[in-house]
Amino acid sequence: MTIELALIVPRMPHPLLCPDDSEGYRALADAYAEARARIEAIQPDLLLIYSAGWVSILGHQVQADPHPEWVHVDHDFHALGSIPYRFRMDPSFGEAVATAGEARGLHIRTVAYKGFPIDTGTVTALKLLNPHNRFPASVLSCNVYSDRAETVVLGKAAADAVASENKRVVAIAVTNISHRLHSVPVPPAEDRFASLKDDEWTRKLLEILGEGRLEDVSQLARTFTAQAHADSKLKAIWWLASCAGAHNRYKGEVLAYAPVQGAGCAVVALQPDTSGAANLEFDEDDVEVYRGDRNVLDPGGAAPVDAAPTPAPAPQPVAKTAPRPARSGRVDVASDKAPKPVGAYPHARRVGDLLFLSGVGPRQAGTDAIPGGPVRDADGNPVNYDIEAQTHAVIDNVRRILEAAGSSLDRVLDVTTFLVDMDRDFKGYNKVYAQLLGGIGPTRTTLAIRALPTPIAIELKVVAAAGDTDMAALTGAARA
Amino acid sequence: MAEPHAEGTGRIVAGALAPHPPHLVYADNPPQNEPVAECGWETLRWGYERLRRNLDKLDIDVIVVHSPHWKTVQGHHVLGVPEFKSLSVDPIFPHLFRYHYDLQVDVALAEAIAEEGAASGLCMQVMRNPHFRVDYGTITSCHLTRPEWDIPIVAISSNRVYFDYNNDVGDRQMVALGRATRRAVEKLGRKALLLASNSLSHRHFTQEPPIPEDMSAEHIYHHGQYLWDMHVIDLMRRGKTRQLMAEMPDFIEHATSECKDGSLSWLLGALDFPDYPAEVHGYGTVIGTGNAIVEWQPPAAEVAQ
């Protein structure tokens, strides 16, 4: 259930169809061969591909024909010859990606039609990296309108599927780096970069990739696009970095870099490596769920509106904690001061005068450390832990989320508590609860359950009044 | 198919803006297309009916189509193989368009267009790979204009000059290509129908209703697009195509127009910028994009020249 290797490969057909026509094409073909050898050494369960050359409009598409077959001819480079192919896809993984994508708010579907046109880049990559179909593949499209948020969420959906399907995966971004081609054919032996600034900027990106800093390149994609002729905004890099976990800890290696009819083409291998550069400086939002920005099919019913008739709560100090509009009559809350959700859900959702919090545990924001220690070690063996410390941390996280939503702990109305060991922990939990919430007096229910998603002993589910709600009126209305 | 005219007596007998949303073929339920629809996009499909009735009165021996969905970077390409028979699956809307096509190409005219284009300084290529799959824009526009497929075609690719340079450079190339097309038609004595296979405003919805032909979900993407479309159509109806060309770069940017693929500019260049009124057969939206079916028939006096 891991990304064993990340690859960036070009989408031009020349390394496949005419590798010996220029030194550059040969270098790229040899680099493809080296990448293929590394794949075969890993023996992955799946080749997971995002292709900048497969353009979609209705959200994203995932190839799910188990054996797509055709004789492909490139629309531009038809004179180089035809490419007969029969590939081996993993339809069930495609379905898993689509399911995971929908859970994260994406519009995504599988396609399995005889004769569906697979793009030149995907055909070239699969022919060169997996010529005997030893490994099944899954291919994702590049939405023409998508920007970073949607593409990053697609990467996370792919990672969700890798985890849920328990696959060892080689993730492959099929993309040129710079995509300015010569407007007239250039004899291969005389091929050169169409733009000097494209070449200069690409070399800088490749230098960073050579240091294994994939996420840094993802963060630089907009800058690159503004300065050079990027291939599809470098969406494929956004996807790859997100799918692999948004980090810089790789052993990076640029296996080849050469012009193909003017475009900047590179083969890059990124091997996960814990000793790589770890420091991250995110300029971009780390998006978990795509909420769309279009509302085109139902503009009347789906237009974002404020949840409350009264003015919205005052902005919170940290921008990311401010409540943001959701699809209809609701406001979702996400806080970077509370632990990151482990799935596709917000920290809280406001509906009318009430705030409904998702289950909150004791993990610490940013580090995921568990105060009082985890309930089991990395091998799954039970270990001793401090329930009082965990209870303190849970209630503190509840407070942080409420404050991010413009409310506060003293406005909690109802609490449901889940304990993994009622016999062992009820007393300690009850003591801390009384200290922190007893005076507030919400209704409460405490349940024993078998396990929680992370190695914690306690989780709270909370309903609270919104910060701008008149508590007296609310409780009065309840009495009435 | 009529016999070719004597060399030098050919002419463009009509030109049409003939947009290619595959939804229209889907809704028509022709035997060549696999998916089946209940209905949909009638105002546009009825517009195509009116266009076909007009064209039936003409003597046409070749259809020349410029398609946004044969995208090329290195020059303008023309089909150069006499026959194509295969399956076209729309990569965007595969659930709507899986069309079995069988068509003939007027290779001599294709080669003549390539020669005339090259003589004008354009980079031209003749596509001679028999395995080539004809793009769905070409197939859709040709099917909707002449579903009998009994007239040979010439398909011209859409060069990405607008994207790699800018709209002005793009328009200049397309007008030159249109004039080259006209000269080739005249030299080879063809009576040609020219089709510009593009939508007007072209911002799509990124979702569709569960039933694609559910017309309760169909409308323009935004009002600004609609205003631009109506303005452009008004210019066509008043014979103000030179003004339209002058405003084309702005239209492309402001309305996200598919004219950025060059088809309409090519057509207007080939028709030498008509100052006579165009006949608008229909306007409608398809998944948010604006589409018009517009016909130009050169006046008799001009044809006689």
Image (tube, coloured by chain):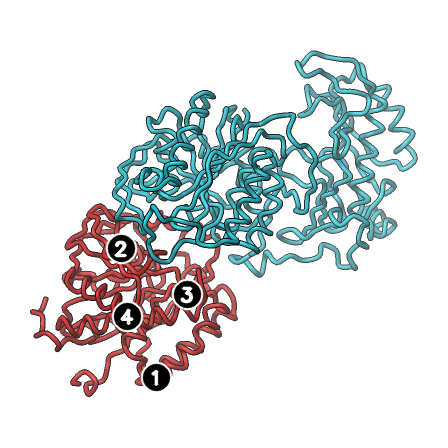
Chain colours: A cyan, B red
Who is closer to the viewer here, A286 or B141?
A286
What distance separates the C-alpha of mark 3 from that of mark 2? 30 Å
Who is closer to the viewer here, A275 or A367?
A275
Label 4 marks which chain's residue? B
Say whether disc 1 or disc 2 marks the residue closer to the N-terminus.
2
Residue tagged by mark 2? B29
What distance separates the C-alpha of mark 3 from that of mark 4? 21 Å
Residue B127 sits above or below residue B65 on the image: above
Label 2 marks which chain's residue? B
Q: Residue furthest bottom?
A: B301
Helix or strand or loop: what does disc 2 sit on?
loop
Indicate which disc residue B120 carries.
Answer: 4
Residue tagged by mark 1? B239
Q: Give the mark toward the camera: 3 or 4.
A: 4
Q: Residue at x 39, y 32 (%)?
A: A30
Say whether disc 4 or disc 1 marks the residue closer to the N-terminus.
4
Question: Marks 2 and 3: in contact by CB < 8 Å?
Answer: no
Circle 4 Cα neighbour tier, 10 Å, few/some/many (<14 / 14–19 / ≥20): some
Circle 2 Cα neighbour tier, 10 Å, few/some/many (<14 / 14–19 / ≥20): some
Describe residue B152's horizontal placement relative to residue B242 as left or right.
left
Amino acid marked by disc 4:
Ser
